[in-house]
Image (cartoon, coloured by chain):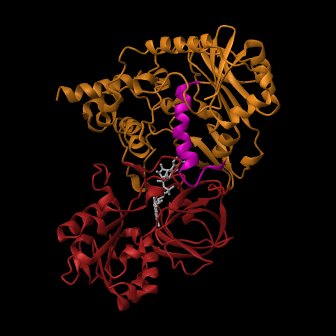
Amino acid sequence: MMTRFIDDANLTEFLSSLKNRYLVYSPQKEGEHYFLNRDGDFTPSEFRTLEPVKSLYLYPRGKVYPGDSEKEAALAILGVKSCDLFSLKIQDYIFQESLPPDPFYSSRREKGLIISSDCISPKKTCFCAALNISPYPETGFDLNLSPLSGGFLVEVGSSKGEELIKEQTSYFQEPQETQLNQRRQNRDDLLKKFAAPLIPQADSLQELVKKGLPDVWEEMAERCVECGNCNFVCPTCHCFLLAEEVHFEKFRLWDSCQFPDFARVAGGGNPLDRRSKRLRNRYLHKFDFFKDVLGYYGCSGCGRCIEACLGGIDLREVLSRLEESLSSD
Amino acid sequence: MKNPYQVIEANIFKIIDETPNIKTFVLVPEQPLSFKTGQFMELTVPGLGEAPFTPSGDLSKGEELEFTVMKVGLVTDALHVAKVDEPLGLRGPFGNGYPLQKFEGKDVLIIGGGVGLAPLRSLLYTLLAHPSKYKRILLRYGARTPEDLLYKEELKQWQEKIDVLTTVDHGDETWAGNVGVVTTILDDPDIDIAQAAAVICGPPIMMKFVTLRLLDLGFKPESIYLSMEKNMSCGFGKCGHCRLGNFYVCKDGPVFTYEKLKGLPEIWD
Ligand SMILES: Cc1cc2nc3c(=O)[nH]c(=O)nc-3n(C[C@H](O)[C@H](O)[C@H](O)COP(=O)(O)OP(=O)(O)OC[C@H]3O[C@@H](n4cnc5c(N)ncnc54)[C@H](O)[C@@H]3O)c2cc1C
Ligand code: FES
């Protein structure tokens, strides 16, 4: 892949030139969290934003009929982290590759630009590396920025990214060997921060959620208050309710499989009639369904659900408890 | 790009009272729709919401579309008070439909319970349009009481063409037929079980016991076709509501062979 160096001043100019063509979102710090906001200056964030990147492609409440996806402005999202890039593989599969495509999601993704950046220090809740997901971006971006002293290494990840660099070559330089080494060093240091084992072996998770004993689900679900936060902050959760509010207008509303009516059918039947079943459903969808359908888990290890859970349910603890339930069997 | 959320308007042309809580709506969509029997549509009551239904009519009647709807909740209550000429909305068709080629040359045993006869009626119309393609067509249908039986006139007409048996859970003074659940009318010494296909639609509990009975009789899991009912919202594999194991029922089904589902512990939930 093509790699270039850009210094701080040129990066600022390069990124502001994007505003002619794109609505630009970048991580902005408020308190201890980053949020994706419009038009602020770009600073390399140490870790992911509070909200998942899906919120810009699939709004929490999005009108889907009538509507014309072609007329929307193109989005450029800066500072996206590796976990969120991974999550877009799941969203792309559901909304773009599985036919028929969702025209709104597809057009936003096709027109959009993603300039990702390396994590510098993970949050306490982060566990991407434990799922064998690289904590620094490897694929799924147009350009990736790795912060160095005085500037950034820019890695090209798509032809769209390459075009951008070719249009404005004067901003970019050939990288020096020392700069490439510095990036390698930073990335090695980052990986070391994930050295402690956080969850059971990644390749055991499908079996654990399928076979883990019911007591674990019952006990963990005791803490669930059915708020749906875990789903709403999850970058890979894609479930929604198609609602009609006024005459033949359709809206996609984010939905939660932790809500009691999620799977209820007419006549009162409900395959997910208990909180424990609904909690397990969430894990089955991520660690069983997507593993079988796509070959990888539908979890990016971003840890947002851990941060957001009002009942203090920690996905890492659930997985560990499932493992224990089987080993003490 | 085609918008799968698009609503096609359809006016109510006629309403037929079938049973105390089931009505058939004959709709005329603003544009003709082409279908495979067994596929379903999302039917919208304007300003309220939508629910999935499988057309129950003769799909070769191009301009008209029939839906047979049981009154059970929000959307279906509103449908039951709708009047002729009122507008409804349609999205679809969605799902896979029945694999008709697989039925050719075979005994086709069609088993319905309650309002589950609705999609099967559309299948019957399709099969009866070319009866010579199938060895025999047999219908077994059960409802709770005699007045809950759907399509009473058509049942008599079908009786003249194919082998039809009906049963009710609870009889009354007018009822001279079989009393008992539908599994009591499945034994038939003449069916060539090795060369038969069974198509089942009804409430989950009925589908479960019918499937178990058919397996006992020697039907192969790959010859038993089930219409799975799940909570559905989008209809085309996006909203996640209808997940069953590694399938989205709306897209991978709603018709499945028992072979495909038999490993799932939650199949009948
Ligand atoms: C493929 C398929 C084919 C079908 N074919 C037929 C048929 O031919 N004939 C027939 O009678 N039935 C059929 N059904 C069943 C039919 O879809 C249900 O009877 C119908 O959905 C009931 O809708 P309701 O709003 O009246 O009932 P409700 O009990 O009010 O709702 C049913 C479902 O919709 C959800 N829901 C309703 N309102 C809301 C809301 N405001 N917010 C969130 N969720 C809500 C509920 O959670 C519930 O899961 C079929 C079902 C499927 C899946
Ligand atoms: S109904 Fe939405 S995925 Fe099946």
Residue in front for this viewpoint, B14 or B221: B221
Side (left or right) of B13 relative to B18: right
Specify the quadrant of the image occupied by residue A172: top right
Inspect the magenta stretch and tell me whether residue A100 lies in it.
yes
Which secondary structure type mostly characterizes the magenta part of the structure? helix
Residue B90 vs residue B214: left or right?
right
Residue placed at 44% from the left, 71% from the top? B119
Residue A132 image position (x, y, % from top left) = 42, 27
Residue A275 appears left or right of B23 = left
Kindly indicate the quadrant of the structure image that contains residue A84: top right
- The x, y position of residue A214, in whole percent, is 26, 35
Q: Residue at x 37, y 14 (%)?
A: A196
Furthest residue in direction bottom, as rendered:
B160
Residue A311 visible from this viewpoint? no
Question: As rendered, which of A150 and B156 lies closer to the eye?
Answer: A150
The quarter of the picture where residue A316 lies is top left
Q: Quadrant of the N terminus of chain B?
A: bottom right
Colour used to depict chain B in the structure image: red
Q: Position of residue B95 (x, y in %)?
A: 49, 61
Say if A278 sits above or below A14 in the image: below
Query: What span is colored magenta in the figure?
Result: A81-103
Residue B261, position as x, y percentages in the image: 32, 56
Q: Is residue B36 above or below residue A321?
A: below
The chain drawn in orange is A
Residue sitting nearer the eye, B177 or A94: A94
Q: Nearer the viewer, residue A101 or A283?
A: A101
Instruction: Say if residue A302 shows up in the picture.
Output: yes
| Residue lying farthest to the right in this orientation | A20
Residue at 21% from the left image edge and 84% from the top image edge? B190
Q: How many marks?
A: 0
- On whether residue A56 falls in the magenta region, the answer is no
